[in-house]
Image (cartoon, helix red, strand yellow):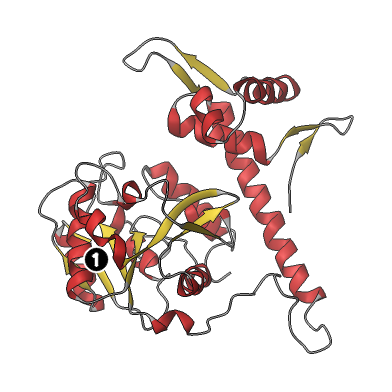
Amino acid sequence: MRTYLVDDAGNRVFGPGPAELLRRVRESGSLRAASISMGMAYTKALALVRNAEAALGTPLTTRVVGGTGGGGSTPTPEADALLAAYERWTAAVEASAAGQFSVAFARTGDGAMPKGGPGCGAPGGAELARRVGVCVLASGHATRFGSNKLVEPLFGEPVLGCALGCVPVGLPVVVSSASPEVDALCDARGVERVRPQGSLQADSVRALVSYAREASWDACVFVPGDQPLVEQGSMTSLLQVAADRLDACVRLSWRGRKASPVLFPSSMYGRLERLQGDVGGSAAIGADDACLSVEARWPWELWDIDTPSDLARICEIVEAGLGRGA
């Protein structure tokens, strides 16, 4: 499915391309950097933004002049509101389409779904031929959120508890924890935990990889504790792909945008243990490494929580019945 906003003449003025461009402008603080990350010419990116602005009658980016980074661009409040509305609408359309597909193709001669349609990739157990464990990153300081986001309630469950819900039954789990609240949650659920020897991301990565090495895991899947809507089906698909490529990293993505969770083979443990500073495991992936992508079922599986508005956005998805298990 592809969703677009069009003008009265039927010309496309906003869709997946401009939406992704605005997301990357928000992340990078630069329209030029956003266009480069998408493999798009800056002139084309500028034209997309200007065309949408003219058709919608509102500015979508604001120029930031000067500063240590030399200036850049940031989305306007109107752009943030547009993007949020577009994502809600797109999600609802895709959910409806998936449901209608399941009804229309419920039986195709032998009673099976067409290969490649929604619902494919059911657990087959092949991934368990390797000893794979799940490493959950839950030791951040949540400075942008203002409190411990991982224990914030998300419809009766802590955010971290929702993140743990993506783990397929039977996989061992370890959580990097730096707070009594996370400790208590892990202990109540019988989940193993480790304490990083520092406060940076790399410290958590090293602690988790050390546990994975001692546990003799052939591979480990890094899952952010603030990414609560990852589907078990997506995790299972990731593991099945990895079972056929023992040397490869495998990561969840949405329409070409790679994100987390990420599976690392044990051959990369050494590099992960050498990471320093405020960087995650992705920093250990080199340009020559085999890195495969598995498409998520829904875009919000890749959403993490940095601010209260991020949590509110995820709550909207759950309230609409579009989250995990819907």
Quadrant in the rendering for residue 191: bottom left
Query: Residue 190: where, in percent of width, then height?
Result: 23, 79
Image coordinates for residue 259, horizontal then vertical, percent: 45, 51
Give the residue displayed 52% in from the left and 18% down from the top.
62
Res 75 seen here: no
Relative depth, front residue between 156 and 313 = 313
Task: Kindly identify the residue that appears in the image at 17 percent across and 60 percent down.
Answer: 207
Q: What element carries label 1?
A: strand
The amino acid marked with disc number 1 is Val
Which quarter of the rendering shows the N terminus? bottom right
Query: Which residue has dot 1 on it?
Result: 175
Query: Residue 54 versus residue 313: which sits nearer the camera?
Result: 54
**Which residue in the rendered view is the most extreme toward the top?**
66
**At x 23% / y 77%, what residue is drawn?**
216
Mark 1 surroundings: few (<14), some (14-19) or many (≥20) residues within 10 A: many
On screen, residue 140 versus residue 220, left or right, reads left
